[in-house]
Amino acid sequence: MMQFSILGCGIWGRGLQGFSALRSGLADPAFVPRDDDYARPKPEAISARERRRSGELINLAVQVAHEACANAGIDPQLPPSVFVSSMSDTAITDYMCRKLVTSEKTLSPTKFHNSVHNAPSGYWSISAENRAPSSFVGGFDYSVGAGLLEAVSQSHAARTPVLFVAYDIANTPPFHDIQRIDESLGVALLLNADTDEGDAGDPAMQPLARGALRYETGLADTRDALAIDRGNIVHPGLSDFAEQTSLPGALALALWCASRGSVGADRPIQLAASAFGQLIIDPKPDR
Amino acid sequence: MTVTIAAYSLTSALGTGIAGMRTGLAAGESPLTSSPWPGCDVECFLGRVDGVSLDAVEASRRSRNNALIELGLAQDDFAATVASARSEFGADRLGVIMGTSTSSIDRTEAGYHDLDAADRFASDYRQPRTHNPHAPGDYLASRIGARGPCITISAACASSAKVFATGKRWLEQGLADAVVVAGADSLCLSIIYGFHSLQLVSPERCRPFSQNRSGISLGEAAGFVLLTRDSDAQRPRVLGVGESCDAYHMSSAHPEGLGARLCMERALADGGIGLADVGYVNLHGTGTRANDETEGAVLAAMLAEAKPSQQPLVSATKGWTGHTLGAAGIVEAILCLNALETSVVPGTMNTTDPDAQFEVLLESCEAAVEVAMTNSFGFGGNNASVVFAR
């Protein structure tokens, strides 16, 4: 069991352009992200020259990563980071595979170097001048749980806040039989280990939420859990929206932050279930 | 706490299994071949694993990485060793960390030859657990019956060096009692044409750290290491791991090698040692001018602080294996472990005219090495160094 706090949150999706939009949406029971209310992010931290090379997936990740740091009041040069995505950059996968079935096969060098799964992490580190460790973690349909486990584990080991960034972009027909994603979504959380010796971070930072993470194998009884990976989010409009994304667990974590830790506060949050195990967040850990 | 290397196995162009690798090293010839890759007209040399035929991969409906994993697991009794660890600790306590860059892109490439009118994959290619970044880690865990935490780390050519950082931490924190850390990457059109687009593919066998270096030769491999907390004095151990980012450019190393220096310093500090304690350094050494000059300058500056009597043996081994991308970390980790265990230190295959401010080991030699360090640097400016001790 590893205890942690969430110090900052960033989000970008349809109708959810920033953490304050999420908070006001959550406060309005009738809120529904409007169909026409998605604009691809243009993170200012990436120079205009570099932004011509970075696609939607990279911009989404970098946008929310910077927002989470600003929201927590931490220097973006500092935190190590863990980036996760269920399908990664399917726009580039599609581009490369289409080129490679032609006789010419010539690839754009920029698109090729952006095709590595850690491209968002690379653009982030450049834009933040951050030289701390950074990884892309794949977990497919349990990416949020896999990445959160890795981020919380790193924070406990390094005694420093760690940035967790989850994102996917809406995809096209070849991938609909793999994992259909209708909504682009990015969520970033600045996580911090809570230990017996106190938080690792700046005591001036007020956490948005606190919990304890445990990894359980087998299919433990989670009937009392808030099964947020199935989109069981109490807000109807946001619950429907979560179902259109590949990362309902990430949206639920952002909602947990937006509600100052009160969503699911009396019930464990089941974060990810896979063939191998599941992550459970206990929102009221025994201190 | 000691993080022990309980077992390891490698399948690469050098040979199938550890015995094959040792035979390949002893043969003293570069296995890189110019025989053409199907569908590819880029002039290049490749480090191929001959035991995995393209037709057999296609017939099995596997990705080439999963076929490499399958072949690799069958070597050195590795699968049996892991099975006995699973019995000892329980499947729930056996974790898996895969490092890969290509995941299963070759299978996705193949699927695009057969899209239907609605742009959907043909039924044979509708394989959710194959066409996603986590596919090789998921496959390995299924094959060995691991039910502990399982992730895939993708950080380009640093991927399977970084698996040691996570594996060591999981054991230290008690998230698992045994962890299989692995690396798998395979040849496919995406990477050959991709590196060709960056003008980095050598038309000759790669010559790392040569005055006449001409770029990279791509390769493929699957390697596995079983990590445990056993304090078995007979086995090598993971001493330290360091990770960093350049924060400079997506596909060019930082000109002063800031990130490369940081990850080496962090790995040495994590192991509680200095560079003077290291007996062998396996360079990233891709054979591109940008990598070799930067990595060489950083290491030269660090070595200048050590006494002449404390200079380690230094070599780059991609002339033996090709650049196996996301698998390069574990390939070179295993070459380090082999040097610790057999005292055979691999030379810099294909290079005869070294270009570095330190002595580059050209011919393999016998030397008792107590501590070895390997470097891996990837696109995105992502770097990792790992230090092993006998």
Image (cartoon, coloured by chain):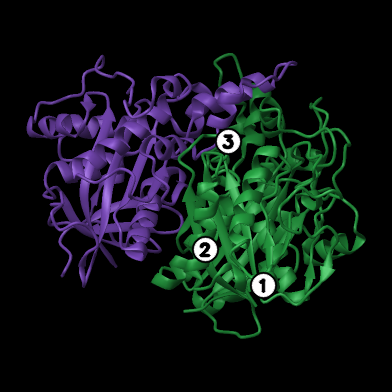
Chain colours: A purple, B green
In percent of width and height, residue A16 lies at: 22, 28
Q: Amino acid at mark 2?
A: Ala
Label 2 element class: helix
Q: Look at the numbered discs 3 and 1 and tell me whether their residues touch, using CB distance below 8 Å.
A: no
The residue labelled by disc 1 is B310
Mark 1 or 2, closer to the camera: 1
Q: Quadrant of residue B199?
A: top right
Image point (36%, 38%), residue name: A128
Within-10-Å neighbours for mark 1: few <14, some 14–19, many 20+: some
Instruction: Work out whether residue B152 or residue B23 is closer to the camera in this orientation and state it.
Output: B23
Asked if one can make out residue B142 in the rendered structure from this viewpoint, the answer is no
Structural distance between the alpha carbons of marks 1 and 2: 18 Å
Q: Amino acid at mark 3?
A: Ser
The residue labelled by disc 3 is B252
In percent of width and height, residue B270 lies at: 47, 68
In percent of width and height, residue A62 lies at: 36, 33
Image point (68%, 32%), residue name: B195
The residue labelled by disc 2 is B267
Question: If the image is split into quadrants, where does the C terminus of chain B sit?
Answer: bottom right
Image point (33%, 59%), residue name: A155
* Among the two numbered marks 1 and 2 on one chain, the one whose residue lies closer to the N terminus: 2
